Image (cartoon, rainbow, N blue to C red):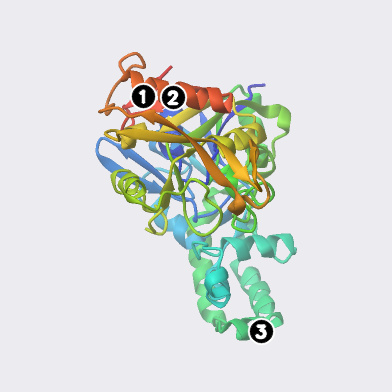
Amino acid sequence: MNKADLIVGVQWGDEGKGKIVDMMAENYDVVCRSGGGHNAGHTIWVDGIRYALHLVPSGILHPNTVNIIGNGVVVNPEVLIGEMAQFENLEGRLFISNRAHLNLSHHSLIDQAKERMKGDKAIGTTGKGIGPAYADKISRSGRRMCELKDPEKLCSNLMNDFNDNAPYFEALGIEIPSEERVLADLKRYSQILSPYITDTTKLLWQQMDEGKKVLLEGAQGTLLDIDHGTYPYVTSSSTVSAGACIGLGLSPKAIGEVVGIVKAYTTRVGNGAFPTEDLGDEGNKMCEIGKEFGTTTGRRRRTGWFDAVSVRYASRLDGVDKYALMKLDVLDGFEKVKICKAYRYKGEEIDYVPTDLENAEPIYEEMPGWESIKGVSSYDALPANARAYIERIEALTGVKVGFISTSPERKDTIVR
């Protein structure tokens, strides 16, 4: 049986996973999403055309690739239907787990209401209902994709849920939707999505038993993991590589090569610790050149220097075999570039990630910058200073760089 290769983000998300998944997908038969929801956006540029994907796996741009949305994903039917409309001939190419949980309109209302109530202590979520949908799942009161095949029964169950939680909705200022409106929406979702809903675990096992090549596409980043990230400023799912097993129904023995996606600098959306954040001109420059605005929300991303300490930590959690280093071209023209090699924490120098990361200060190395790498197609053709920067990242993290992105375009990627 073939093993499934895995792509995982090893920072706070937005590392550029979509481009690498899209580039690698042409060599795979199956591409799978295992967790998260439409709070995660993957951007892919092909021949100057921008594709923004939130729920549909990034392999969808390859006509012969099967795409699976796994049981670990929380699915907003409205968003998924809108996203599917970008593409033709999806039957036989897109499959949705019957065990995946539904993320419905009331989940986003709850999410947004809770964020407002927290004020300056808000997590900084996208407000897309991901947390409340996972909360329902964990409390065993969630609704699954398989239930869409009987919209009348699902509607009745949802109305009972709403009525049972009426005081909760009232406290949050959320109006319970009418049964007529809920049923109408569910019938439309059922009509469009039912042909794609199936037992994807069984399907994936079958594909692997037949020797098909499988690629697992991680969402968000390791430092946002519910257990191992910068809690409580994290997402509501497991974003480490092991989470892909749970989110698709695979055993750890089924995982092959793990490719970690890292940006050549660091970004973060929302609140939470960010030791290498640069609030000055250089941070603004990285943000503007790198177009660091969220695919899902359009929010400006916080921007700063490469943090080798947190990347090394995340890489160990994920079992990363090699990196894809993204957006190196964004650093073109900087006189100096910086790498955080350690933290100053409680008066000592440390090389690990503490639970109270907000109290850690970065200890930087400065290196000379370079002019331009945009579109460079071989490692040896990179400027010497750019190669030195890459090799220092390798030395500090203990992981080799296998891919180097030199522009947003699919073709502009160096393979070492």
Left or right: 308, with 15 as reference point: right
- Pointers 1 and 2 in contact (CB under 8 A)? yes
Of the two numbered discs 2 and 3 in the rendering, the one whose residue sits closer to the viewer: 2
> What amino acid type is highlighted by mark number 1?
Ala
Report the disc number at residue 343: none
Q: Which residue is mark 3?
A: 166
Q: Residues within 10 Å of mark 3 (few under 14, many from 20)?
A: some
Left or right: 87, with 190 as reference point: left
- Pointers 2 and 3 in contact (CB under 8 A)? no
Q: Position of residue 289 (x, y in %)?
A: 29, 44
Residue at the location (36% across, 17% down)?
379
Q: Which residue is mark 1?
A: 386
Image quadrant where one finds the N terminus: top right
Residue at the location (48% across, 24% down)?
392
What count of labels does the image hold? 3
Q: Is residue 312 above or below residue 195?
A: above
Q: CA distance from mark 2 to mark 3?
A: 56 Å
